[in-house]
Amino acid sequence: MQRLLLLRSHPALRSAWIVWLVMVAASTLTRLVLATLAWQDLDLSPGAVLDILLRGTAADMLFAFACAAPVLFVGALAHRGRAPGRLRRGWRLAVTTGVVAAVGFSAVSEILFWEEFTARFNFIAVDYLIYTNEVIGNIRESYPVGAILAGLGAAGLLIAWLLERRSARLQAAAGHRGWPWPMRLGVAAVAAVSMIGAGRLALAIDASTGNARSLRANTVDQEIARNGGVAFLAALRDNALSFRRFYATVDPARTDELAGPWPRQRHLQKGEARPKHVVVIQVESLSASFLGSFGNPRGLTPNLDALARQGLLFSELYAIGTRTVRGLEALSVGLPPLPGQSVVRRPEGEGVLTFGAVLREQGFETSFLYGGYGYFDNMNAFFGGNGYQVLDRTAIPDERVGFSTIWGVSDEYLFDFALERIDRAVAGGKRQFFHLMTTSNHRPYTYPDGRIDIPSKTGRDGAVKYTDWAIGRFIEQARSRPYFDDTLFVIVADHCASVAGKTRIPPDRYRIPAIFYAPRYLQPAVHDRMASQIDLVPTLLSWLGFDDHGRFFGQDLLSPDAVERAWLGNYQEVGRLTPGALGTRDLVVLAPKRSVSQYRIDADGSARPVPVDPDKAEHAIADYQFADSLLRDGRLRAAPPAGDAAHASLGREAVVR
């Protein structure tokens, strides 16, 4: 009994036990909160609930053990058994308070992350660690950080004080004796081995959760069953994925037959003259479901709805991904969403052919304007090195910015700056292409007062309506310019506001609006056939009368030969969506470990697993395998036109000015 008391009372073991207990308790509480937030989407069948509890508890305990083991390792080697003095007790109390508060902060962060993405920590969380200025700023603007930290600190201090009192009683009963050296070395060795083993087991459970039979039909159940810390480590490990190594493939000779040929055949649109200038407005997080044109009754987008009625509306267009960087990829490089990072952030993205580069070949001056700081997600380097002059927040004079968030200037001020640049550029006599990227429709959803009838910082609806107001104002201001009649305005989202659903890739959460607006050249119409975001580049080039020599992956949507299909991705899983029977749609999903699955998407958006159609699966695999080979083998690289180096240099100067 005395030896057992000695073992239990040792500070190293006691500290490790505290860390383990606090982490398991916090993980369990977090799971309960997340389950409450997602209650309507959970599968509450007995098998699913039992699987969630067993997997979740096992992952929580193993991850907590892996985190507690280093405490035991250091404590076993460092503690010699002397009675702690006042200074050491104070230090121990402070450290325990910090640990408890840190665990609590992680739990709160998980809950806030879930509210934004309906997922455990994933690739996005990994990316956010790189861009701490924007992320921390966004958190400070969106939430009462001071109150949260104060509450966590107070709770941590209270728990630490209670634990310290109990520890003091245990150690007093044991007589403050330390472990002999052989025991200390043995405990340290066991702690080190156990840390590695527990971590690997936790990652293995996390990897198997997506394939668990009782959870496969519901991704919300899968996410609830996971542990946030383990999910973060898995995302950190899998940040880069080789399609050839991890995904199902077909015979390379078949890819040209199924996805090729390369370059593709193009049929230019012939007829009347086309606009001289092009302005693309890419809108942050603009789901199709926000627009009245798509059935929203709340009146959030009166200006966009008017433009949709007066222009060419693409009503069945699907984004390729879930983040801005994917939307930028679609409107520049035009590739299906390869697993892992976007082309914008890959080394292979340097020197690739882009929409802007092709327009420069046709005599355009091309510019990318972003309301935030373009180092985020590698925007400056990518666009500046691939045919665009880059202008970001650093190029906008501070006195011209009436309101901004950590993500960038409010949309109206971005549009004011853009209008000045367009006025100046058009006056120079050359054709102009401007690609604008907005930021206001993003948490913290704040904007200048008095613009719309929804108060700032009250939620997404207000941000959507403000962005709509800013776009309407921009178009009306441009209407008074002499170049308005000779300008094509393209309004398109980068991705949807939320991709939460019961499947990993819920197609309805990828549906975005796109509008071509040029009253002098385009009659009002609706294109209601399924299409992909990457099809916009070849469609625009063909309609403008420019031959891209078949160098973009997508197709001209206005061609009678256009085929209905769309590509969707979420970093690890990628899919190909095609029309099904009787108004349904079929989604083939490719995942690591060469997994292939298929879902039938009904008219109401619900999804159900169905047997894999070999023909549809082969086409999906071929498309992604072909796109991967184009990028990996350098076939997307473009020989820059004369003067390209000077042009890219101009872009970089604009960024650092």
Image (cartoon, grey):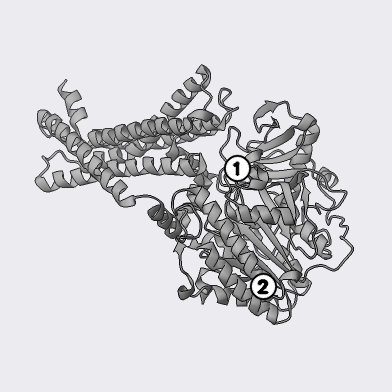
> Which residue is at the front of the view, 584 or 410?
410
Q: Which residue is mark 1?
A: 297
Location of residue 70 in the rendering, given as x and y in whole percent from the top left corner: 32, 41
Q: In the rendering, which numbered label is found on residue 480? A: 2
Location of residue 572 in the rendering, given as x and y in whole percent from the top left corner: 60, 42
CB atoms of marks 2 and 1 within 8 Å: no
Q: Callout 1: few (<14), some (14-19), or many (20+) C-alpha neighbours within 10 Å?
A: few
State the residue at coordinates (53%, 68%): 413
Query: Can residue 639 be seen in this snapshot?
Result: no
Reply above or below: 166 against 311. Answer: above
> Which residue is at the front of the view, 73 or 117?
117
Instruction: Please state, as top left, top right, bottom left or bottom right, where the N terminus lies in the image.
Output: top left
Total labels drawn: 2
> Which residue is at the front of the view, 427 or 183?
427
Q: In the rendering, which numbered label is found on residue 368? A: none
Location of residue 218 in the rendering, given as x and y in whole percent from the top left corner: 57, 29
**Mark 2 or mark 1: whose residue is earlier in sequence:** 1
State the residue at coordinates (73%, 52%): 313
**In the image as oriented, which residue stretches furthest toward the top?**
46
